[in-house]
Image (spheres, rainbow, N blue to C red):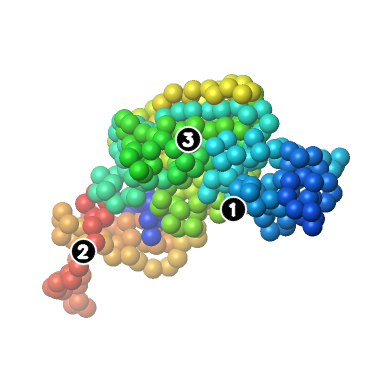
Amino acid sequence: MPRRLTLPLLLALSTLGLLHLAAACGGGGGGGGGCSPAFDDACVCADPEGATCDPDVDFPCSCTLEDNNSPANNSPANNSPANSPNNSPDGNNASPPSPDNAGLTFVATYPDGARLQFPSNPRGFIPTFTGDGHLVVLLCALSDPTCEAPVWIGAPDRDDPAQWSASGSSPAPIQGPFGPTITLRGLPAGTFRVMIAEDSAASRARGKAWTDGRAGAGRPWGGVVSTMDLLLSDQDPDVGFNPPPAPREITLTADNVTDLGTIDLGHFFEEDISPTPQGEEGLLVVASSSTGGLRLIDLERRDLLTAPGGGLDHVLQDADGDPIEGTICNLLPGPDDL
């Protein structure tokens, strides 16, 4: 019987729209008195382009209107960059800051054995555990173990030392056993499952940054993680073992910062490509560096074909059955002995 060929990581290597009604700026200048309809002075209204009425105010305020036509959470305190990950470069898909103003802090690291879950040959070529990704935090209901419907989602600003600690003049890299101290505010109060993901530089380069759309909402982890990203886990990777994602239970209280401690990003995430792509007719020929023979992969069945007489190594023959001698111009290393 031919051996079953397991598929390597080929694919990886090769908004909920929010309607904002902005109060128009009147001719009277800045502050609440210059907005129409008029609001109290605690709100700085923005025009549809996001510019504030008051040139002395350096933060935008969308003046989102509730049914009672009052501003919602648009006070300067709730929109300051230090308090709101929604104002970070990653904030396009972030949840709005909560008036509870709960906080969360943790140290993000890689676990012992990072990369051991990958086969030895391609291990050095898989661009993950590189320390230069962005972080995404998801708060989920206790009844939602895989966080298909996040209650809150946001990202710390790597360039803000109040949210992401610095190393010299640069953001501290994620590494093991050390990493950046992350602090987020503006979170809702309550008891949640929390999942933390590293939005890797590799997935971002492939157009798969978590801010590139929420079309995956309803899938695990809010649909905002993609192949090459890393997730919080409570076990270390080992040879052939990719630790499962493990959200933690946490209780956040209003106007208080809760310390989650040091967390390990050990689960390597791969997108589900089910159903299995349809096979195609054809053969893929590979050379074995250990035996010097050629092996044939049936692309329709995804199987190694057994050679005449047994074994896996095929010999090229001419019409008379004589071996054909030649030279292989180039070899691309593959997993194991391929």
Count the numbered circles shown.
3
Q: Is residue 270 something one can see in this rendering? A: no
Quadrant in which residue 95 is drawn: top right
Viewed as shown, does residue 15 lie left or right of 108?
right
Q: Which residue is mark 2?
A: 331
Q: Residue at x 79, y 57 (%)?
A: 27
Q: Position of residue 264 (x, y in %)?
A: 40, 31
Report the front residue among 273 and 69.
Answer: 69
Q: Residue at x 41, y 50 (%)?
A: 201
Q: Quick check: 42 above or below 279? A: above
Gap in angstroms between the C-alphas marked 1 and 2: 39 Å
Viewed as shown, does residue 162 lie left or right of 19?
left
Report the front residue among 308 and 94.
Answer: 94
Q: Which residue is mark 1?
A: 213
Categorize mark 3 by other alpha carbons within 10 Å: few (<14), some (14-19), many (20+). some
- Residue extending farthest to the bottom is 319
Q: Residue at x 27, y 48 (%)?
A: 124
Q: At numbered mark 3, what does the secondary structure look like: helix, strand or loop?
A: loop
Q: Which residue is mark 3?
A: 162
Q: Position of residue 303 (x, y in %)?
A: 36, 56
Q: At numbered mark 1, what does the secondary structure look like: helix, strand or loop?
A: loop
Quadrant in which residue 280 is drawn: bottom left
Q: Position of residue 88 (x, y in %)?
A: 54, 45
Give the mark toward the camera: 2 or 3. Answer: 3
Categorize mark 2 by other alpha carbons within 10 Å: few (<14), some (14-19), many (20+). few
Gap in angstroms between the C-alphas marked 2 and 3: 50 Å
Query: The residue under label 2 is which amino acid type?
Result: Leu
Report the front residue among 141 and 99.
Answer: 99
Query: The residue under label 1 is which amino acid type?
Result: Gly
Give the mark toward the camera: 3 or 1. Answer: 3
